[in-house]
Every structure is written in C-alpha cells, then in structure tokens.
Amino acid sequence: KKDAGYGYVRFQTAQEIFKQAYQKDKFNYTTVIQEFSRCLYQSVLNENYREKYKTVPYGKHFIVSDDLITRNSSVSSIVVQGVKAGEPTDLTTIWSMVGYPNTCISIPVWIRGGKDLPTILEYNPVMKTSPLNKAALEWKVGCYSLDIPEGSHYLNASALINKDGKGFIQRIEPVEKEIFAETEKKLDSWRVSPATTKDITDYYAQLTKKVIDLYHITY
C-alpha cells in the first residue's frame, strides 16, 4: 500500500536514484557504494544534503536522518561485483563495508583468497569486533553527537560533508577511489594470469595498511 508502513520513503529514494543512475549510464559498483550507500538525499523534501553541506563550514548542523537510506541503525553494506561470462566465478568481488556506511570504507574480498581475510575485517578478541568496524563506529559518534534521549534521530550532516573538505565521507572517498582503481588493475591482471591465494592475501595486506593509515588504527 502506497505511503504505508516503515521504510517506504527510503524505498522511494532508492527508486529515484537507481533510475537516475541507469539513465545516465552510471549504474556500476562504485556508484552503488559511494552515491547510494552514502546517499544524503531526502526524497520527500527533495533535499540533497550532500550537495547542500559542501558549501557549509563544519558546525552543529543537524538533520533528521530517519528517512535517509543510511540511518543511525544501519550497520553494514555489501556490493557484489560479478564476473563476465567465461570468467572464474571465484573472482566475484564482494565489496564489504563492515560498519556504518557513512563512516566505513569499502574493502574487496574474494572467495579465491580462501579463509584468510584482510586483518582489518577480521574479528579482534580485544576489540570484540573488527578493527574497521571499531574505527567506523568511533567516527559515527561524531555524526550523532546530540546527548539527548532522541539524539539517535539527529545526524550532524556537516560531520560527513563540509566546506572545509574534511568531513568523514570526504576523507574516505578519495582513498576508496584509489582502492577501486588498484583493484581494477589487479582484476585485469588476474583475468590474464590467474591469481594465487598468495597474490590475494598480499593485496589484502596492502589494503589493510591503507585503511590503518586512513583511520590511524592501532591494534
């Protein structure tokens, strides 16, 4: 039933942005990760907070986030990048955001890598979560900083995007684009010369270092 139940506004937003991406021939995994998972468009109000706060300095600029695609209760996101006909299915790429998507960078993993994963994604018994999720959650605190009973509904949009270019999204996405480009090179190479488990785990180590540098993680 139209306009009934929970989540229909977010569904409406998803319909709109997927349609626009398809019409502009931008429907690909990078768009889904960066423009959909971190979409700050509110379709009822026709307000794109990502664009709006590009011109606003960091400050106390709170918006109600309940009807955004990623809201306070969003805990992770994955995007599966398939392979072409005739290519090895174990090179299907799983882009993994193991924390709140607005503050969590996406990391590629492959079945061909075996049981080993980037250490940044693995459960750490001391942290009681993965190092990347812990770092993403620490940044998330800066997004929902109102210390009131209903504070979880109010997102400081300028913590994610601001005029200074130092919002969490603005810090994540340049590094993420580097990972996209490097991963495409790896996949092109592996299509010609099949990757070994070591090739993939070596790349995982490179990715882990890049993420540690971004979030200044120590463990």
Image: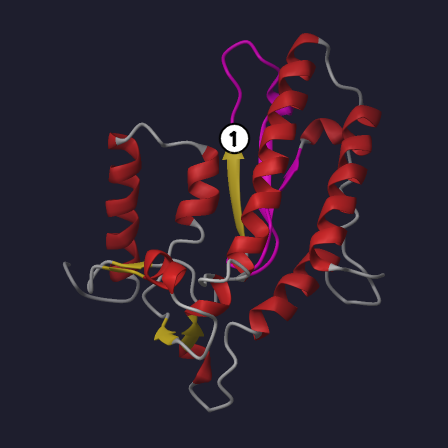
Residue located at (76% from left, 67% from top):
128
Quarter of the figure with residue 168:
bottom right
Say what amino acid the circle numbered 1 marks: Gln
- The residue closer to the viewer here, 144 or 125, is 144
Give the crowd class for mark 1: few <14, some 14-19, many >=20 residues within 10 Å: some
Horizontal relation, residue 57 to residue 216: left or right: left
Q: Is residue 28 visible?
A: yes
Q: Is residue 72 visible?
A: no
Quarter of the figure with residue 155:
bottom left
Q: Where is the N terminus found, in terms of image quarters?
A: bottom left
Residue located at (49% from left, 63% from top):
160
- How does the figure colour the protein chain or chains? secondary structure
Q: Where is the C terminus found, in terms of image quarters?
A: bottom right
Horizontal relation, residue 200 to residue 25: left or right: right
Residue located at (37% from left, 62% from top):
55
- Expressed as whole percent of the image width and height from the top left, the position of residue 17 reads 29, 45
Q: Which residues are magenta?
A: 81-109
Quarter of the figure with residue 40:
bottom left
Was residue 107 drawn as part of the magenta stretch in this picture?
A: yes
Look at the picture and state if 197 lies above or below 101.
Answer: above
Residue identifier under label 1: 81
Horizontal relation, residue 34 to residue 111: left or right: left
- Expressed as whole percent of the image width and height from the top left, the position of residue 118 reads 76, 43
Was residue 179 drawn as part of the magenta stretch in this picture?
A: no
Residue located at (41% from left, 78% from top):
154
Element carrying mark 1:
strand
Look at the picture and state if 37 lies above or below 24.
Answer: below
- Expressed as whole percent of the image width and height from the top left, the position of residue 41 reads 31, 57
